[in-house]
Image: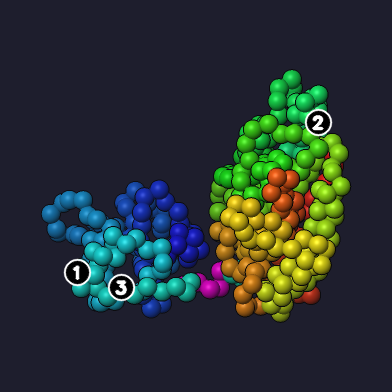
Amino acid sequence: MEESDVRYATGLTAPDPFVLVLAGPRTHLIVSALEAGRARKACPAAVLHTPAELFAGAPPGRRSLADQILALLDRLNAKAVAVGPWFPAGVARALEQNGVDVRLESASPFPRRAVKTPREIACIAKSQRAAVAAMRAALDLIRSAEISSAGVLKSGGRTLTSERVKAVIERTLLERGCSADGTIVASGPQGARPHDTGSGPLRANVPIVVDIFPRDKRTGYWGDITRTVVRGRASPDVRRMFQTVRRVQAMALSMVRPGVESRAVQRAVEEEFARAGYPLRLSPPGRESGFIHSVGHGVGLDIHENPGLRNEPGRLRAGHVVTVEPGLYRPGLGGVRIEDTVAVIPGGCKILASFHKSLEL
């Protein structure tokens, strides 16, 4: 199973590897003696095992993860196991060499993870509020920056860089119990590459894409927000891109409700961008332009999880939590992306933490 599936099933995280085995109605956990107390507290209904318990009476020695699993399977009289696509290949090979039939399952063992409980939605909303606070701090810093004669942003007498803005974002998130990895502050042409995290000096009069996705350090749930701003005056091209993205995002948000097919939202956004004069171009590699990604993704214990708003079958349900993040990209000019995280509710969707959508600072 993926780490997040294990956390979903048990509530447990640990620095050392541990094993979850679902056998009929029973949940079995193999943990080190160092983690046994925490495991008992996190998952009191589980049958708990430690290497010392599994190998009681055997000569002392270090036992591999595969050895521990084999000992438990022998105790359960199990000759076959189903594992997910992220199961360690070396452990799978060791099990097979000892006569265990290892079957690969692509389906999630916990499909109900996609529909969030009220508690889970509250956890995501908390991370999203932290993301909004960090966004406010980042944009306040960019807004307060002076514009040098060379068009470079200056703050406190020093060049304002992507790295300095990210540091402010990270401090703000840490104060709210969240961590961040991969935060995007991408200026000008860097923003034309959606996952370019950005680096170096920030410039005036060009779009700056700020994408913040924090994870709560206690609960493990994520948030995700993106805004695009210009310090100074945006060009007519950038202003038109921004107005189009903002309008299309509002349309997409209006479509998100129970029963709507995921690909219907994707196709509507693609068609609206094309009508606005922004065709999709996926070649040559590295020079893609237009709307080049999905409308959104699920958010929970993973930053990207099901369901997505993309070109695939599947209908939204109340309790789904998804991002709505259309964007436009033009190599050499930059990108414009606006993103909110929403919970699907009866009759529509609810933005979990609101923040203004303005271009020029």
**Which amino acid lies under the numbered mark 2 shown in the image of this protein?**
Ser
> Which structural element holds mark 3?
strand
- In this view, the residue in front, 195 or 14, is 195
The residue where tag 3 is placed is 102
Residue at mark 1 to residue at mark 2: CA–CA distance: 65 Å
Asked whether residue 130 is in view, the answer is: no
Other residues around mark 1 within 10 Å, as few (<14) / some (14–19) / many (≥20): few
Q: Report x, y in % for residue 60.
A: 16, 51
Residue at mark 1 to residue at mark 3: CA–CA distance: 11 Å
Residue at 32% over, 53% down: 32
Say which quadrant the N terminus sits in: bottom left
Magenta-drawn segment: 109-113
The residue where tag 1 is placed is 98
> Which structural element holds mark 2?
helix
The residue where tag 2 is placed is 144
Question: Which of the 4 image quarters holds residue 264?
Answer: bottom right
**Which amino acid lies under the numbered mark 3 shown in the image of this protein?**
Val
- In this view, the residue in front, 155 or 207, is 207
